[in-house]
Image (cartoon, rainbow, N blue to C red):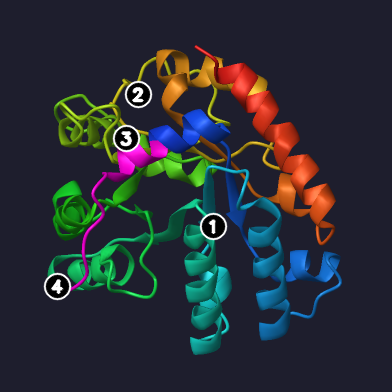
Amino acid sequence: MTSQTPVTPFGARLRAAMDARGPLCVGIDPHAALLDSWGLADDIAGLERFSRTVVEALADSVAVFKPQAAFFERFGSRGVAVLERTVADARAAGTLVVMDAKRGDIGSTMAAYASAFLDPSSPLFSDALTVSPYLGYGSLKPAVDLARESGAGLFVLALTSNPEGAEVQRAVREDGRSIGATMLAHLAAENSGAEPMGSFGAVVGATLGDLSSFDLDINGPLLAPGIGAQGATAADLPAVFGAAVGNVVPNVSRGVLKHGPDTAALRASAKRFADEIREAVAV
């Protein structure tokens, strides 16, 4: 690592952003159907126009952006270049960026993935990265170590909103604990003693209903997809997350993005979701 590392850990920066702007995270998901609904071509020009519009409309008001790397990578190197600019512009405007890339591997390969997104000298450096622990939680160690060193964070897939996730995440180990619960316990250990909040979060779907059988008090953020198009509402959050609701970062993508390319409509939609979420999670 060659550049100076951030002074403040991701968890503390995220807590400050949530307190100042509310906890809403807006996805940047330029899939083909959405580009078309905006009147944009499914090409590099459309990709760039879409991403630039979302950042310009919302960067001064939302706490977090979550670009989905796959929608940029499908265009090859030119798409990755747009992703680099999107991340840089969002962070320069004061919005935290969680890169939704769901990387997971072992050894030097995991270290390379971590370097791509968590090394401040990388053009894709983001405030946090989503990762998959299903080669074993220990396989994430290169990413955990680099995140600590760089002041970045991780969001580990724990209890995801897709129905297929349950066959792995709810499977029970020999010790009687589910895989999802095991991941939450690992994250709680990573965040032990961190103030005001740890930097190692979990992805936990807002559509999953009562999760009282899981200990969500990991002293870290809970990235919660499912608000809006997937059917969950802000009002559902307290019942799903219980006492941990104050650390929830609800993600809305299509629910906001469908209002583009009108920047005023994007801003109004994001404000509406942010106000509803802020009221629902007030503790």
Q: Earlier in the sequence, mark 2 or mark 1?
A: 1
Q: Earlier in the sequence, mark 2 or mark 4?
A: 4
Mark 2 is on which residue type? Leu
Regarding residue 259, the answer to whether it shows in the image is no
Using the rendered view, name the quadrant where residue 176 is placed.
top left
Question: Disc 2 and disc 4: Cα gap in Å?
Answer: 31 Å
Q: Mark 2 highlights which residue?
A: 216
Q: Residue at x 82, y 62 (%)?
A: 261
Q: Mark 1 highlights which residue?
A: 93
- Queried whether the magenta region covers residue 11, the answer comes back as yes
Q: Helix, strand, or loop for circle 3?
A: helix
**Residue 180 on image: x %, y %:** 32, 35
Q: Quadrant of the N terminus?
A: bottom left
Question: Disc 2 and disc 1: Cα gap in Å?
Answer: 31 Å
Q: Are marks 2 and 4 in contact (CB under 8 Å)?
A: no
- Tell me the magenta residue range: 1-14
**Residue 170 on image: x %, y %:** 36, 33
What numbered label is drawn on residue 108?
Answer: 4
Q: In the displayed structure, would residue 268 be above or below residue 127?
A: above
Q: Residue at x 63, y 18 (%)?
A: 279
Is residue 76 toward the left or the right of residue 7 in the image? right
Q: Helix, strand, or loop for circle 1?
A: loop
Look at discs 1 and 3 and give the one toward the viewer: 1
What numbered label is drawn on residue 180?
Answer: 3
Look at discs 2 and 3 and give the one toward the viewer: 2
- Queried whether the magenta region covers residue 12, the answer comes back as yes
Q: Earlier in the sequence, mark 1 or mark 3?
A: 1
Mark 3 is on which residue type? Gly
Few, some or many C-alpha atoms within 10 Å of disc 3 (few <14, some 14-19, many ≥20)? many
Few, some or many C-alpha atoms within 10 Å of disc 4 (few <14, some 14-19, many ≥20)? few
